[in-house]
Image: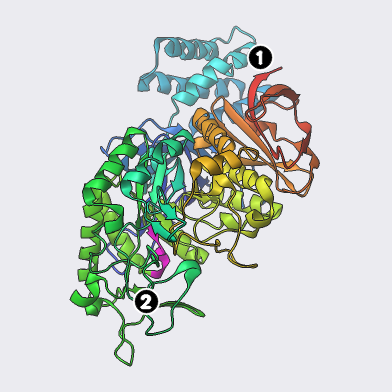
């Protein structure tokens, strides 16, 4: 039922369908600890009297926090009038909600009417009397400081003092001190409460973090040129790579599946498939995503990597370097996974009696059986929850979920809710390269972060549209994690753009999204695809061990400086709170079609990024800044410090830039106003 002072079109709100009419059909919107988020609504009433509105957060303890006044937004068109907004933030993790309180504002109505009537000589003393009575109501309500009480009492006296000039009496009643005091202590008539609207506040890592992906079997692996034999790396040799990862400023080290790899239909280098009946060569290591063999399934580790104690030692080594370990959760099986023999009903049986392997026609994945979640859903759900809790018990608090869009949404909603109920600090990242409705829904039902379409956004119009979408339009549903590359995705921009392309994509990801990631080898500029037109790496780690001599490779790449460049980007992110937020991104105008500009601000911390998207030639452009987005008045000049080059310039609303492939970006912090 509509309230006495109507509140409609509330944002952010997530509506969800339900097959139980007694359930609340609202899902909690996303927020993180200390992260401001906007609440907007259309608030109106009949007639011409003034109104007020505010947002009240209700914490996990059920206690209402101090209200935050909503301010009217400028109307964009005739359909966006009476729109109000307030930015709020939560100070504790857990389930929150917000309410919108609207009311008739007799004080607001009086200030509006009195300013007109008294100056026009209409009902002068009547207006002063009505104002005095309202001010006395404020005094009677209490809650004022001593200074505020004295201010209001003086206004009451001025309203009574008919011996003083009318102009002087009105000036005192309209003084900034009186207005500020009465705005802080409004009279709320016809109070209407709309809500509650649920919000879930996660720990900060759900919003902000730098991810680094590596394959343990490649770290510390060795190659014998005499025999051609490759020896797998282990958890212990992979741990030796962790100090370098930490030194680059990463927060999360993500491991693809570490489980036993199936031996049936095992894939070879570059996704090679043997004809039926041919034995698998002993040097074929297989895909880590073909999970399960005689050595165990999802709760086991590959024998080549070591033991579960070795894994525990890896997690401990990471923790000592302030790195969190993220583990892949891939709900699929190799044909020789223990589940296949123990629970054949968990899979799809074809007409000829065989179990269906994974397909994405024309692609075939003969080494993988997908799980059929419509067969024994309760049994499958219980087993997956057991597996997740097993790894949680071994120190894993972040899971990167492989292809969640190929499993039922209802299953994920249940699983994530079960984990959140007991362990709300555990984070799930959805690797959902799929249609927008599925991607958005997975975020809405509980996934903390999501892979996105960022990798394929390379042109200016696409970049700007996507930054606007993820920071403003969908931030209540999904938190993006901008990966510049993955074992699956080597975009042609990186294949043919040279070192400049790697710098450009790293700046775009790290400076626009609070969470970003890269796959090992990016800092070396690895860019060769298996064939023209493919996004697969040549000699992909998905199918074989990749032996890297990091010391030699890094030395050879020193001329490109990608490692130091990435290290600097992560240092800038850690130093500036503005870069650790999502919803504060604002685009600015750059005249060149290959230059983008945006800013982020948090309080006094403001960062401006101007980036060329052209890895091949220099670009010159005028950049026009929205000074209000930077918290600056029109016409302001200010000093900017380039965090990459160390240079400083005086900037204003209109600025000239020149960017080239060697230095494709300015990352500017606003130092002082002039």
Callout 2 touching callout 1 (CB < 8 Å): no
Residue 58's quadrant in the figure? top left
Q: Residue at x 50, y 61 (%)?
A: 540
Left or right: 557 in relation to 37: right
Q: Nearer the viewer, residue 528 or 440?
A: 528
Q: Position of residue 21 (x, y in %)?
A: 30, 66
Q: Position of residue 479 (x, y in %)?
A: 46, 49
Q: Residue at x 41, y 64 (%)?
A: 403
Q: Position of residue 468 (x, y in %)?
A: 60, 49
Q: Is residue 403 magenta?
A: yes
For residue 582, say whether it is visible. no
Left or right: 670 in relation to 341: right
Residue marked by disc 2: 265
Instruction: Give the residues drawn in magenta, as a range.
Output: 401-406
Q: Nearer the viewer, residue 469 or 56?
A: 469
Q: Position of residue 134 (x, y in %)?
A: 46, 24
Q: Nearer the viewer, residue 77 or 586?
A: 586
Label 2 neighbourhood size at 10 Å, few (<14), some (14-19), many (20+)? many
């Amino acid at each position: 039922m509509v309230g006495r002072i109507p509140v409609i079109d509330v944002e952010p709100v997530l509506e969800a369908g339900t097959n139980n009419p007694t359930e609340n059909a609202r899902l909690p919107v996303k927020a993180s600890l200390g992260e401001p988020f906007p609440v907007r609504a259309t608030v109106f009433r009949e007639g011409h009297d003034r109104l007020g509105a505010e947002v009240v957060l209700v914490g996990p303890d059920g206690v209402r926090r101090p209200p935050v006044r909503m301010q009217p937004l400028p109307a964009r068109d005739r359909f966006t009038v009476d729109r109000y907004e307030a930015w709020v933030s939560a100070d504790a993790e857990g389930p929150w909600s917000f309410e919108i309180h609207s009311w008739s504002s007799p004080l607001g109505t009086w200030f509006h009417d009195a300013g007109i009537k008294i100056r026009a000589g209409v009902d002068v003393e009547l207006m002063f009397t009505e104002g005095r009575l309202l001010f006395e109501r404020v005094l009677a309500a209490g809650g004022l400081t001593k200074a505020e009480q004295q201010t209001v009492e003086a206004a009451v006296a001025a309203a009574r003092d008919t011996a003083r000039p009318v102009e002087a009496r009105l000036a005192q009643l309209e003084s900034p001190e009186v207005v500020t005091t009465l705005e802080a202590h409004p009279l709320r008539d016809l109070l209407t409460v709309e809500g509650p609207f649920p919000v879930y506040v996660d720990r900060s890592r759900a919003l902000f973090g730098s991810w680094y992906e590596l394959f343990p079997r490649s770290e510390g692996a060795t190659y014998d040129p005499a025999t051609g034999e490759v020896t797998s790396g282990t958890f212990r040799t992979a741990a030796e790579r962790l100090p370098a990862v930490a030194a680059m400023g990463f927060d999360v080290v993500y491991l693809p599946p570490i489980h036993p790899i199936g031996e049936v239909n095992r894939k070879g280098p570059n996704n090679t498939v043997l004809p039926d009946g041919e034995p698998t060569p002993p040097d074929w290591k297989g895909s880590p995503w073909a999970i399960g063999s005689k050595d165990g399934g999802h709760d086991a580790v590959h024998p080549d990597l070591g033991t579960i104690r070795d894994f525990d030692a890896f997690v401990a080594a990471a923790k000592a370097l302030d790195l969190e370990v993220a583990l892949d959760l891939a709900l699929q099986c190799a044909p020789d996974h223990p589940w296949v023999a123990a629970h054949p009903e968990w899979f799809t049986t074809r007409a000829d009696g065989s179990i269906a392997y994974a397909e994405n026609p024309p692609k075939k994945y003969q080494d993988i059986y997908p799980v059929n979640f419509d067969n024994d859903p309760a049994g499958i759900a219980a087993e997956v929850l057991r597996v997740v809790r097993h790894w949680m018990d071994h120190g894993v608090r972040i899971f990167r979920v492989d292809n969640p869009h190929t499993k039922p949404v209802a299953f994920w909603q249940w699983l994530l809710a079960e984990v959140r109920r007991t362990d709300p600090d555990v984070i799930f990242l959805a690797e959902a390269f799929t249609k927008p409705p599925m991607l958005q829904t997975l975020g809405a039902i509980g996934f903390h972060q999501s892979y996105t379409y960022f990798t394929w956004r390379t042109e200016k119009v696409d970049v700007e549209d996507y930054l606007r979408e993820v920071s403003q339009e969908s931030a209540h549903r999904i938190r993006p994690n901008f990966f510049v590359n993955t074992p699956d995705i080597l975009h042609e921009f990186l294949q043919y753009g040279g070192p400049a392309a790697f710098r450009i994509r790293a700046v775009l990801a790290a400076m626009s999204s609070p969470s970003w990631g890269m796959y090992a080898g990016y800092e070396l500029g690895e860019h060769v695809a298996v064939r023209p037109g493919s996004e697969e790496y040549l000699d992909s780690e998905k199918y074989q061990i990749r032996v890297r001599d990091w010391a030699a490779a890094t030395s050879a790449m020193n001329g490109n400086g990608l490692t130091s460049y990435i290290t600097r980007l992560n240092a800038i992110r850690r130093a500036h709170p503005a870069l650790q937020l999502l919803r504060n991104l604002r685009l600015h105008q750059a005249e060149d079609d290959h230059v983008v500009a945006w800013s982020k601000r948090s309080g006094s911390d403001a960062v401006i990024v101007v980036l060329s998207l052209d890895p091949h030639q220099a670009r010159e452009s005028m950049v026009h800044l929205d000074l209000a987005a930077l918290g600056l008045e029109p016409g302001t000049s200010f000093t900017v410090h380039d965090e990459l080059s160390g240079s400083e310039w005086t900037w204003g609303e209109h600025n000239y830039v020149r960017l080239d492939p060697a230095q494709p970006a300015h990352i500017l912090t606003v130092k002082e106003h002039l």
